[in-house]
Image (cartoon, rainbow, N blue to C red):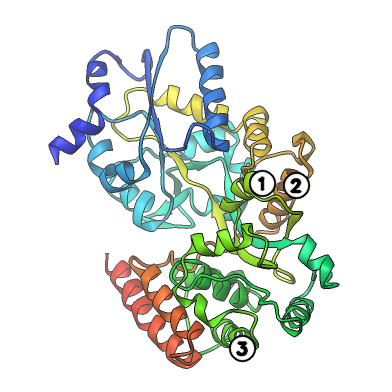
Amino acid sequence: MAAAVAALAATNLAACGDDGGDGDANVLKLWHYESANSAMGLAWDRAIEIFKDEHAGVEVRFERKAFEQIQQNAGMIINSSEGPDVMEYNKGNATAGLLSSQGLLTDLTEEATKRGWDTALSPSLQTTARYDNGVMGSGNWYGVPNYGEYVMVYYNKELFAEHGVSVPTTLAEMTAAMDTFVAKGVTPLGMSGAEYPAGQLFYQLALSRADRAFVDDYQIYANPVDFSADPLRYGAETFAQWVDKGYIAKDSASLKAEDMGTGFISGKTPMIVSGSWWFGRFKSEISFDWDTFLFPGNTLHAGSSGNLWVVPETSKAKSLAYDFIDITMRPEIQALIGNNGGVPVAGDPAAINDPKDRKLIEDFNTVSSQDGLAFYPDWPVPGYYDVLVSGFQGLINQSRSPDEVLDAIAEPYQDGVAEIKRG
């Protein structure tokens, strides 16, 4: 374990002992794992430039890490004097929540109030920033997100026009649109049963009959969840009906998300229901006319903040770390995220040049402002992702009924929640 920490922090060893106290630190060690040409990578490079301009005499030692490096070793890294002062880290109970409960992350509550992060971020975005004994949704601030993500419908405008289909604004119109495609021999909805897309579609359908109380019950265990009743029953039964009606291909049970995405890129798939993380790639790789719309009729949508800036408790430059986080929340940096295909959490659509980028952000702002981010179906308990994938593969290939799938996903959820509550 010590070797792993040493390898990850090798270039920082020279920094040990030369930072001084928090008040007179002259080095800011910053780690993140965004690629250099991504929206966040570009925006944060600019944030580093601004930080240097405003902190003469302070050296920024930035290192780009692999997601897996930090994901697998975060506890060791930030429990060491060799770790960073500010770091990008995954949100959720099993990651930031766990480290906060172990006392490894700095409580940012006072800074969030003083610097206005608590007013810049909507309540649903704050959910992944605040933890109470490791459970997200309330308590003190242990991280700050500055970009977001959400699930929407991507559609091929040329196929819609060719088949005389209008953009649906209700779920009934969505099913009517899919009936039109099926009648003309076109499978309307791309799908991946072997990875996350099937579970996210099930969740979107369930959310069409849900309210915030259900999300709180399901995600943060406010009350027990009944898997035999709506909205989860509606989600599973409607998903199965969509397979029966030919909206979803039965042979998509073994497909991966990449297969679904490349199918849409090829121009053969009218629609997919998936996340904003595809947006930049579609902009660069698709040659036909395409666009997006929010899952019709829903006020709740799968989505959340992006990853968090966290400050390890061992940091010797906390004030500098707070200053850097604050810069990433400024309008200039938020606009850079938006103008490069990302979703800023506090972006002004008027500052976004490309109409498609602007619509992406306007839709996110609509969801966020109505407290509509409902997180993801696999978040509640560790290991639940594989449970959902297995369950919904059964619905796609029709080897299981909706009742059987709901039973199969209920028990691991309930066992996981019970274990978390036992601590």
* Residue 164 in which image quadrant: bottom right
How busy is the neighbourhood of tag 3: few (under 14 within 10 Å), some, or many (20 plus)?
some
Q: In the structure shown, which secondary structural element does the residue marked by tag 2 occupy?
A: helix
Q: Earlier in the sequence, mark 2 or mark 1?
A: 1
In the image, taking residue 389 as reference, residue 325 lies left or right, namely right
Label 1 – label 3 distance at C-alpha? 32 Å
Query: In the rendered structure, are the residues bearing label 2 and label 1 in contact, judged by CB atoms less than 8 Å apart?
Result: yes
Q: In the structure shown, which secondary structural element does the residue marked by tag 1 occupy?
A: helix
Query: Mark 3 = which residue?
Result: 241
Query: Mark 2 = which residue?
Result: 356
Q: Earlier in the sequence, mark 3 or mark 2?
A: 3
Q: Toward the viewer: 219 or 6? A: 6
Query: In the rendered structure, are the residues bearing label 1 and label 3 in contact, judged by CB atoms less than 8 Å apart?
Result: no
Residue 224 visible? The answer is no
Q: Amino acid at mark 3?
A: Gln
Q: Which mark is residue 283?
A: 1
Percent across and percent down for residue 102 are 27, 48
Percent across and percent down for residue 245 are 65, 88
Q: Amino acid at mark 1?
A: Lys
How busy is the neighbourhood of tag 2: few (under 14 within 10 Å), some, or many (20 plus)?
some
The vertical placement of 159 against 134, above or below, is: below
Label 2 – label 1 distance at C-alpha? 9 Å
